[in-house]
Amino acid sequence: MQQQAKIFLADERGVTETELFRSYNTFNFGNYQNENKAPVEKLYVCNDDTLAGGKIFILTVEEDTQLIILPVVGAVNFIKDESAAFTVNSGEVFCTFLKQGEKFELTNPYPNELVNFLQLWIKAEDDNSQLTQLHNFDIDVYKNSAVSLKLPLPFSITKLEGRKEIIYVPVKKSSCVFAFAIQGAFETEGILMHPRDSVAFWNYKQIEIAALSSDAIIFLLEV
């Protein structure tokens, strides 16, 4: 099987912006449609969202979906119904299952501050309706090494000092690994990544990642 890689540049993402929020879309989403921004395997939404103080927006999933929320700055409230309401803080990852057509709300809990978070939508092949997880992690304690979290799909996040390197070995052979640079610059298998760039890797036995700036943060998800 031949190794392949595809980069998604941050500067080429779609954007939806109002007075209340701004959403950068790595893949086709809403009114943003581009033939070169098709989903990567099961991962069909990767949105980088900023929400104004005290504001809320409502979304509807297009199909059975495993939702992952990763706050970058501040926190975000997730609400599906009265029995499913969670506050997700920076340093935590939230994961839950949503059925096709189901709605959910995301709210900024701070009245006067912006929050920034990533949300990933992954096509769910099985009904994991009972699966809701909230994981916390400390990438400063484990700086320069990968922190792996037990989500439905293999997920790891790491913070590297400048010129430090790690090697990621996929959990599943012949899988697709989606890498997203949250902060700082990286060289990933020879590909230069700036903040909020992402790369999909197919059929790599291992992925070499080197930080080109201090306190660079990257996550990897096997999709």
Image (cartoon, rainbow, N blue to C red):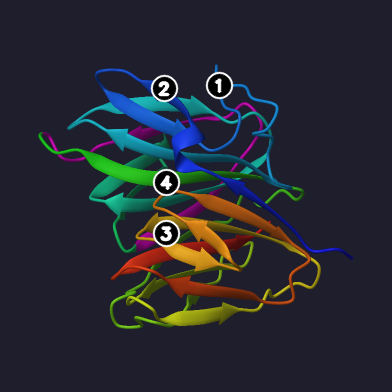
Looking at marks 3 and 1 on the same chain, the residue that comes earlier in the sequence is marked by 1
Looking at marks 2 and 3 on the same chain, the residue that comes earlier in the sequence is marked by 2
Point out which mark residue 60 bears. none
Residue under label 4: 118
Tag 1: amino acid: Tyr
Residue under label 2: 16
Of marks 3 and 1, the one in the foreground: 1
Task: Give left or right: position of 170 versus 135.
Answer: right
Residue under label 3: 93
Element at label 4: strand
Q: Tell me if label 2 and label 1 are in contact, CB under 8 Å.
A: yes
Q: Is residue 106 magenta?
A: yes
Residue under label 1: 32
Tag 2: amino acid: Thr
Task: Give left or right: position of 206 versus 149.
Answer: right
- Give the residues in magenta: 92-111
Q: CA distance from mark 2 to mark 3?
A: 24 Å
- Residue 128: x percent and y percent? 66, 52
Mark 2 crowd level (few <14, some 14–19, many ≥20, 10 Å Cα): some
- Residue 111: x percent and y percent? 12, 34
Element at label 2: strand
Residue name at image x 34 percent, y 28 percent: 22
